[in-house]
Image: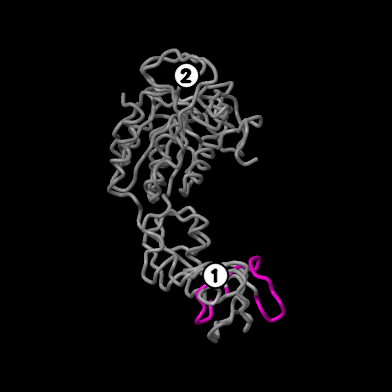
Amino acid sequence: MLTPDAALRRILDALRPRAPLQGERVPLAEARGRALAEAVVAGRPSPPFDNASMDGYALRAADAPAPGAGLPVAFDVFAGAPADRPLPPGACCRIFTGAAIPPGADAVEMQEEVERRGRRAIFRRAAVKGRFVRAAGAELREGAVALPRGAVVDAGAVGLLAALGRTEVAVHRRPRVAILATGSELVPVDGALRPGQIRDSNSHALAAACREAGAEPTLLPIAGDEAEALDRALAGAALADVLLTSGGVSVGERDLVRPALERAGFSLDFWRVAMRPGKPVAFGASPRAAVFGLPGNPASALVTFELFVRPALRALAGLPGNGRAVLPARLAVPWAKPAGLTVFLRARARVEAGALWVEPLATQESGHLTSVTGHQALAVLPAGAERLRRGARVSAILVAPPTLDPAAPSDLA
């Protein structure tokens, strides 16, 4: 069996020729969280003109070389108005933040350092050339790359694009994911239950995880444990970049997904990983799409999604890594595990006395949805370990911010 790290490398290597997906143009309001499929070049300098970074007085620095210099106030300059007249020699002007520096001025003094006496301004300190002046092009020169290809658009980048006059931008397409739940025991979430049946929860959980990873999920009709039903369902995934199936990839007599995938043109690379939960996980590809055969147990499906599908979807979307912080942590309770398997415990995470602690949820049963509800981390117990003591060093994949110890001192207080 592959280790989890080796399995992920195989997946990303297989996706490399098709990742990232081609670009599409989207409105600025829809660009956040997407990876740029083009470099964005500044069409004009930023800022476009010299302007004041403080409310105060614009002057020639040479006219106030020492504290106590007094200059007449020639006029006022407000933000949004052009600097349409030069500053007379030996004078200053009242200026406001963002207003254009008038020709002849080369410094601004903040109003707190100026005493106003009628139409004269008395400067409490020597002026310095360039002080509180934002020079044209200081942020970006005309023709400079404002955002490189592949940059992830965050709120600041949205503002920068708006400042550059971009109403739309080219970004890599979101992966389209088809989700197929399999099993004759499953009924839709709004369906009536008969004896022996359960509602399909995996499809909805995986769809939520896909959206959080930046993909566009589509739920296919549930397929029962019959070859013909699986073949019909897989035909509905023709336009997907990624197919996710849950259930039916183990070794039971009714585990028919693997042969159905092969009939649909998928070549499977692997179907077992040395991990818990999620050992029966499969990966493969066809010329048009990748496929992940995830286990049917809810915790196994979501953990394998987190470890393998999430980074794959982000790679297709042009996004870096898995988007998670992986930090050293300490195990809050002792734990025993089988040797040879990497174990991923769903855990709460807290910062205490400068250390990150991970405390496993009360249940780790792979069939329990409560074992994947409300956790903040996956505590990674290494394959070679069998018994870990309290305080043992482990890795933690943070899926949500850790809780901070309220009693701990804070630099922000």
Quarter of the figure that contains the N terminus: top left
Q: Is residue 137 or residue 275 the one in the foreground?
A: 137
Q: Distance between the residues labelled 1 and 2?
A: 60 Å
The residue indicated by pointer 1 is: 127
What range is drawn magenta here? 99-121
Local SS, label 1: loop
Q: Position of residue 233 (x, y in %)?
A: 42, 42
Q: Name the residue under label 2.
A: 392
Give the mark nearer the N terminus: 1 vs 2: 1
Above or below 243: residue 300: above
Residue drawn at the location 37% of the way across and 48% of the way down = 316
Q: Is residue 110 one of those drawn in magenta?
A: yes
Q: Which of 343 and 150 is in front in this view?
A: 150
Is residue 197 among what the camera can see?
Answer: no
Q: Dot 2: what SS?
A: loop
Q: What residue type is labelled 1?
A: Ala
Q: Which mark is residue 165?
A: none
Where is residue 407 drawn, in percent x and y? Answer: 66, 29
Tag count in the figure? Answer: 2
Foreground label between 1 and 2: 1
Q: Which quadrant would residue 59 be assigned to in this image?
A: bottom right
